[in-house]
Image (cartoon, rainbow, N blue to C red):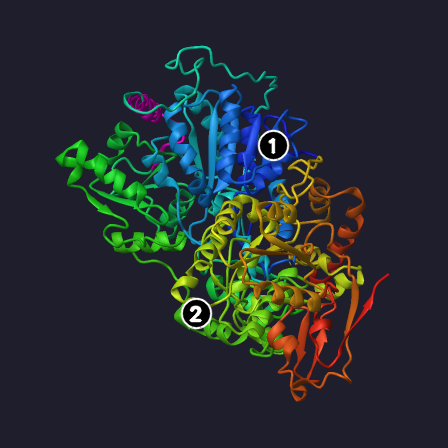
Amino acid sequence: MKQTTLSMDPYNLIITGVGGQGNVLASRLIGNMLSEQGYYITIGESFGAAQRGGAVESHIRVSAQRTYSPQIPKGKAHMVVALEPTEAIRILRDYGNPGVKVLSNMRPVYSMGVICGEQSYPSTEKIKECITASSKASWFVNSTDEALKLGNPIFGNIILIGALAGTNALPLDHKSFEKALLQRMKPDKIDVNLKAFDIGKEMTSA
Amino acid sequence: MTTLNTGRKGEKMLLMGNEAIARGALEAGVNVVTGYPGTPSSEIIDRLSKADRERNLYVEWSVNEKVATEVAAAGSFAGLRSMAVMKMMGVNVASDFLMHLVMTGTRGGLVLVSAEDPGAISSLTEGESRYYSKFLEFPLLEPGGFQEAKDMTKWAFELSEKINNIVMLRTVTRISHGSGNVVLGELPETSPRAHFEFNGTILDEQTGPILTVPGPFAVNLHARQQNKLQAAANLFEDCPFNTYEGPENPELLIITSSVCHLYCIEAVELVDAPDRVGILKLGTTWPLPAKFLKKHMQRTERILIIEEVLPFLEENIQVLACQLGAEFAAKKFHGKGDGTMDKVGELNPTLVAGALSRVLDLAMETVSVDYSENINKQAVDNAPDRMLTFCPGCPHRASFWSIKRVLELNNQQGFVCGDIGCYGMGMLPCGFETVKTVHSMGSGTGLASGFGKLGQFGMDQKVLSVCGDSTFFHTVMPALANAIHHRADITLVVLDNSGTAMTGFQPHPGLTIKASGTELPALDIPSICRAMGAKVQVVNPFDVENAEKVLLKTIEDPDGVKVVVMRQICALSPEKKSKKQFEIQVDENVCIGEECGCNRLCTRVFKCPGLVWDGEKKTSKIDAVLCVGCGVCHSICPSGAIQRKEIA
């Protein structure tokens, strides 16, 4: 199968967010899109108790050579996609490095400490400043807002997959996304998800 | 569309480890599959339950792991390939039956899948079941990747039939919940006829009755069992799941198994030492293949054993080295024994690379100190911790709210013994720290039964236990019988949310559906408790006023065992999702925030994620994205600022 060259091999992608935001589906769709092109894919995920308001992270390893471990070594992420902006910062602490790129949704999901006023949540400007200072490139998008326009905040993860495609970090396109959707979803759900993908792609395409 | 039960030989799929195990079982022609849900094992049965008609399977979510193993063993005794699936704590529950089963042996291939959780990511302990294989004397297989998870599962059935005994396949969270590329094998056509043959002699494993018998006969059976284990060891000597990669004579030989194999390969890359380190990966970790290990240990003088949690491999390999003679015993072993590795927690490539860099005195490339110090500070300042909490609209939050309130009203230092499920979080602020003990499944009511008999020693605290609807059937019923029979003064609160919510809504005997979705008779929890002799009330936790009234009256009744069933369907259940009962709004003119005197009851104490404290306006507000419209916050607001409107 024809493969485009990866900028890094293995390419280490982390998708992070809060339980319930659709991390697992996003990582499976991206994995399917790349696996279909002949890459070795390993996805590492921990879910279970994390569903209940905890931070969730998916590690995706993409390689043309072999199967890598389901955990990315510390400090070795190439791209962090965050469904929640402060989760991007948390991930960078463990997996960041000066060459990392970050794509983040800017809609907060408040932790209990913030909800009850015991902890403060950083301003959008502060979050952007933090991420910009600790990465080589960054994209800040409002995927939840766009998803709400489509009628359901759950499309936020699909919009981010589109936005990731728009960064050209990995060989992801509309066609491969459609193929991956067809493997997992009922036909009546395909169109709205494709639309969400295209909206996202538009956000980051140069 | 390619699915697990239609994918053809040679097709490539991206499969979760648990899906790979499910596919391996299908490729082995499994007929009977049982289990009890528990992270990270649950997807195996979930996936197989969707294949039951097409692939001629009988799939059930059993009442607990012991019964699951017994149901699967019945399949085996009747000549069918069978599999029982559970998380590691489940093996403890099944172990009583297992100890007897390994003595009698099996007929149709029987595989026990134990999915374990080093690091206790979704578990209350790191407890592992590898030791059962040594203690109960049956073979243990551990897949080191996703393709192997499938292939090894299929092979486990063949092995079980070769030695006529149960085989355990152990997976871990990072395999079970990880995903990787898997090339599919053939799906066989099976049309077996189940029949239990018992007319042969008691010594004939294939045709006689299957019995454990006391005395010398038990000793004979034990000897036969050990011969089977030796037969497995012989087969393991040239098993394709045991591999070596590396130089002919490495300076250091890593011996590893399971997902650690992938960490080791990557760690050798991270310290850039492919010429100095060899990796021996064992797929068969009990009994050990002695000749195979001898051959590879000869390559080197230094051995590093990489495995998670306890030093199971390490200690067994060191015993083997001593048996192999002075030359092997004198080798330098690194691992948990010499402190190179921890005996707790899960591993990752970085931890293994760290061990290699210490053992071989190699530099390891790391992120600059400036970068890490800066991002660490930013994370501390700007990424608020996320403590686990109940979902918005979770009935448990409402139930614990009422329990907490009546314990305060009763004012006798009452407490709650907890159990296993989402409601275990009753120990956290989200459950108002109401739960004061949590152990294994069913233990909450067992402990309560004990506490409830301590009145004669002056104990005057009110004793409650909580359990979920699935846990009730799993192991609470015997504890409840004990409490009722001994007239313990306790209240059992059954938090009935209509499913095994924490692991993904698997059905249980209280529901009318089985694994594959067909109808089954449901057992009614209140009727069972009444028949057992308890006084029973059923309340809706969302009706806070009534729930508190009933609970208070119940706990103050000193006579024996009382049961309150707090029934409200889980907010995440497929039936309920996206259906709001109420539209909720905070009237900013009525909410006076800190001035109210309620001490911000809704956001500071009740703490539903759907309710947010607006620091600028100094009032509470509803997060419309998160709120599921249960209406409970309306009931707790003393000033009537939280308003609800029924949605037609």
Say which residue label 1 marks.
B59
Q: Residue B201 placed where, x, y %? A: 40, 11
Q: Is residue B244 magenta?
A: yes
Quadrant where the C terminus of chain B sits is bottom right
Q: Amino acid at mark 1?
A: Val
| Residue that lies at the very extreme toward the top in this rendered image | B200
Residue shown at 56% from the left, 77% from the top: A119
B205 over B305 or under it: above or below = above
Chain identity of mark 1: B
Q: Residue B12 placed where, x, y %? A: 59, 33
Name the foreground residue: B235 vs B543: B543
Q: Residue A20 placed where, x, y %? A: 64, 58
Q: For this view, does A56 lie left or right of residue B575?
A: left
Gap between marks 2 and 1 measured at Cα:
50 Å
Q: Magenta part of the protein: which range?
A: B218-245
Q: Quadrant of residue A112?
A: bottom right
Residue shown at 53% from the left, 46% from the top: B477
B193 over B648 or under it: above or below = above
Q: Are marks 2 and 1 in contact (CB under 8 Å)?
A: no
Residue shown at 79% from the left, 65% from the top: B582
Say which residue label 2 marks.
B372
A126 over A50 or under it: above or below = below
Q: Residue A173 placed where, x, y %? A: 69, 49
Element class at badge 2: helix
Quadrant where the N terminus of chain B sits is top right
Task: Please say whether residue A124 is visible from this viewpoint.
Answer: no
Q: Main secondary structure of the magenta part?
A: helix
Name the foreground residue: B609 vs B13: B609
Q: Any mark on residue B179, and which?
A: none
Element class at badge 1: strand
Q: Is residue B550 magenta?
A: no
